Image (cartoon, helix red, strand yellow):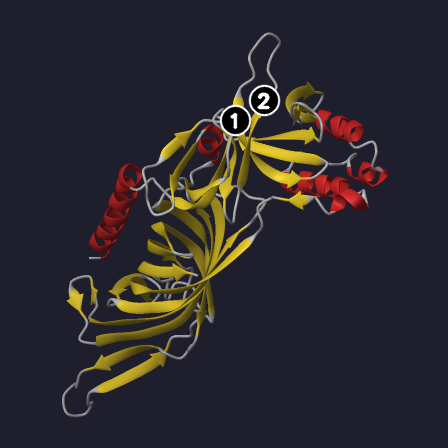
Amino acid sequence: MKKVYLKHLLLAVSLLAVSSTAQAQKNFRPGYVVPLAGDTLRGEVDVRGGQRMASFCQFRPAGGGQPVRYAPTDLKAYGLSSGDQYEARPLPAAAGAAPAYLFLQVLARGKAALYSYTDEDSRPRYYLQKTGEPAVVELVQNTQNVRGETGVVQESSYPFRRVLSQAFADCFAVQPMLPHAELKEATLVAIFERYNTCDPAAGAAAKTMARTTKFHFGLRAGMQKGDITYYHDGRDEIKMASELKPVFGVGLLLMPGAFNTKWSFGLEALYQSQQYHTTYQRSSGFVSSSNTYHVDITLQTLRVPLAVRYAPLQGRIQPYLQAGIETAVLLNTHQARYSVTTPAQGTALPVTTTTTEVALRPLGFGPAGSIGLQVPVGTGSVQAEARYNQLDNSSRATNTLDGAKTITFLLGYNF
């Protein structure tokens, strides 16, 4: 039953994920375009991944008019009303070749501007342009494998440090930041911000455009069911399944500004209850015991999953994969009992029942994985998710009660 339930959940979410790639790729948000001539136009910009945003801009007037596609040679700039901004810039070209234009994302503005875009290999590329300079200059860090006495090792060179040292020679405060700098967005933004505020007169015009870290608080609710195995005398496996029960709680979605927009982290606190009951008899070889055994277990837990989320598509419907670790806090450790009922033996021995409490662990840990869909709605987003997790041993003693394996179908809203 559990396998059928899981199969249906995963199939439903998978079909929605596949259909989203064909039917729901547009993701228009309030934005603007700056034509080569004329005033800035306000409307909506179709938001996609980094490579797509660098190649062209799809824009439509406010109110849902017909979208217009602009190449980097058609606009000065475009951007979101509250979000990323892009400027059309020619990239450095080989001798004799015409420069290629791209929309570069603006990470910092001022006396020196920092730009970025994602290339075909999904690597970030960074560029410098000082005020008055005709073209951008790429900032490069090289890594190569070198064979040494102890084997193959990686060696890095940092040409960008020399480029920045020369370009920022008029600001002594920047120089100590360069000798150990790495080619990373957060590091570069800090360097450019320091340079652009080096001169108090120019500092007022400096502006950092880098992505900021965002937190989204949310609510969660859904249904869950699990199964568990009890080991009679540490040997015989007695499998039990719980009924479909509700689960609800809160969640926090963290989107680090220094990370690729496809990656985020999720932390949740979910309450759920699982009840397991079974009655059985044992046999030893060809002889059946007359005793009847009862197992009654209630697991009231606060589940705290911490997961990494990957959303490869940035369209209107965003399928995602999620994996992490889940902690289960048992709220009542005295709700597991094992009973033996012995029938009457003649008139001297009446029916007797002996009950023993199963000592439970207050904490459980285990892996969790899920697939889901997220749909931006207004200023927030709705998500639907199918999740599976498995906890470690539930009882204090080994070979008594293993960890619950749980399937959850969860709906949520992120504010």
- Above or below: residue 139 compared with residue 401: above
Residue ID for mark 2: 91
Label 2 close to label 1 by CB (< 8 Å): yes
* Secondary structure beneath label 1: strand
Residue drawn at x 54%, y 36% is 86
Which amino acid type is shown beneath numbered disc 2? Leu
* Secondary structure beneath label 2: loop
Camera-side residue of 167 and 39: 39
Q: Position of residue 70 (x, y in %)?
A: 43, 29
Q: Is residue 139 left or right of residue 344?
A: right
Q: Quadrant of the N terminus?
A: bottom left
Residue ID for mark 1: 102
- In the image, farthest residue toward the left: 346
Q: Is residue 55 left or right of residue 336?
A: right
Residue drawn at x 33%, y 60% is 411
Whole-number angstrom distance, CA of label 2 to CA of label 1: 7 Å
